[in-house]
Image: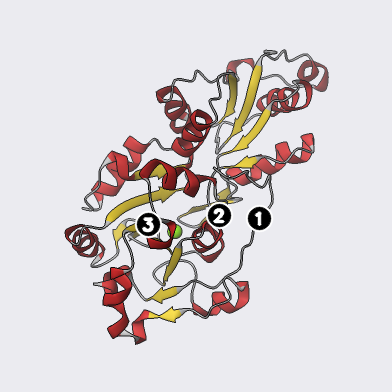
């Protein structure tokens, strides 16, 4: 596993112009022959809001019939893989639990890969907690009943002294007291790691956005002046975990996504091939504006078959 760039966007660039598969029918067959594994971002690729992208189920079934491996990735740390499995299947998409990699599960796999065996303090929700528990850890959470107000009370918050990692993910019950606990552990315990499940600053909802996990991470990063180890897209750690766990060949792996600065950058940074589909956030103009160039472009995943 690579040494991870703490808190820095790696920004490996692909300078080769994208191949627009919409205009090259003849290249799609050869393209699929060059791929063993397809890793999918979900929202904007397989479904949008509450509706499956037309033809997505059939496309995935076709890839399976061709012997391709399918994986699903999500930066969302609030859901366990089981919850995500239920969501994927609710769209009529065939899926099994071992095909799902979320940032919470990725965090747990990362900790196991480094033989981490100390105590964990977490800012996060049940999804993160359950994945850590399934991996054999018993994360400490700050009991919201113990939330205090006033600086003198905050400075008296006692922390356990043998914590080895603070993990920060999306937490809709975030309090100042939780942040004090995390801050104290990171700044007062020598060698305490700071791990972020993901750094999505906003969380997309029906009528706009809400603060995301990345906003919480930024707060702790700012107060402690310590950069986190980041698990989720577009950093490479989650892909490294998938590649290692599944024994994949990066050159024959395709990252499929709808967002350039997370999905496509994730693939480029990780050394896989990348396919931008135009059913979600980014469009062709975004490629010019963001200067993140996918290897391939296609209107919709259904068009690949
Ligand atoms: Mg997406």
Mark number for residue 40? 3
Residue designated by label 1:
9
User: Is residue 22 found left or right of 63 in the rendered image?
Assistant: right
Q: Position of residue 154 (x, y in %)?
A: 76, 20
Mark 1 CB near ligand 1 (8 Å cut):
no
Residue designated by label 2:
234
Q: Is residue 279 above or below residue 111?
A: below
Tell me, yes or no, whether the two marked residues, 1 and 2, touch with CB atoms within 8 Å.
yes
Q: Where is residue 74 in the image (x, y as percent from the top left)?
A: 44, 48
Q: Where is residue 33 in the image (x, y as percent from the top left)?
A: 28, 69
Q: In this view, does 234 lie above or below 22?
A: above
Q: Distance between the residues labelled 3 and 2?
A: 14 Å
Q: Is residue 192 above or below residue 286?
A: above
Q: Distance between the residues labelled 1 and 3?
A: 21 Å
Q: Could you say whether the residue bearing mark 3 is in a helix, strand or loop? A: strand
Q: Earlier in the sequence, mark 1 or mark 3?
A: 1
**Residue at image x 41%, y 38%?**
79
Mark 2 CB near ligand 1 (8 Å cut):
no
Q: Could you say whether the residue bearing mark 1 is in a helix, strand or loop? A: loop
Q: How far apart are marks 1 and 2 (CA)?
A: 8 Å
């Amino acid at each position: 596993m690579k040494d991870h760039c703490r808190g820095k966007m790696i920004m490996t660039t692909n300078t080769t112009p994208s191949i627009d598969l919409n205009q090259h029918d003849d290249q799609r067959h050869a393209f699929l022959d060059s791929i063993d594994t397809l890793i999918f971002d979900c929202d904007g690729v397989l479904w949008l809001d509450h509706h499956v992208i037309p033809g997505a189920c059939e496309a995935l079934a076709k890839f399976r019939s061709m012997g391709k491996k399918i994986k699903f990735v999500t930066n969302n740390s609030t859901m366990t893989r089981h919850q995500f499995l239920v969501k994927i299947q609710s769209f009529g998409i065939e899926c099994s639990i071992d095909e799902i990699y979320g940032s919470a599960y990725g965090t747990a796999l990362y900790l196991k890969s480094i033989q981490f065996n100390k105590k964990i303090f977490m800012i996060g929700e049940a999804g993160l907690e359950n994945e850590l528990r399934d991996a054999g850890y018993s994360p400490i959470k700050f009991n919201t009943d113990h939330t205090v107000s006033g600086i003198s009370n905050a400075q008296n918050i006692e922390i356990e002294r043998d914590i080895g990692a603070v993990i920060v993910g999306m937490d809709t019950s975030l309090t100042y007291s939780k942040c004090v606990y995390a801050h104290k552990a990171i700044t007062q315990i020598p060698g305490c790691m700071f791990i972020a499940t993901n750094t999505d600053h906003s969380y997309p909802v029906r009528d706009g956005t809400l603060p995301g996990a990345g906003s919480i991470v930024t707060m702790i990063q700012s107060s402690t002046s310590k950069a986190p180890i980041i698990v989720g897209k577009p950093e490479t750690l989650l892909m490294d975990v998938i590649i290692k766990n599944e024994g994949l060949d990066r050159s024959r792996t395709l990252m499929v996504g709808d967002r350039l600065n997370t999905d496509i950058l994730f693939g480029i940074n990780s050394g896989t091939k990348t396919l931008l589909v135009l059913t979600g956030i980014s469009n062709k103009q975004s490629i010019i504006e963001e200067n993140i160039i996918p290897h391939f472009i296609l209107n919709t995943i259904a068009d690949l078959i």
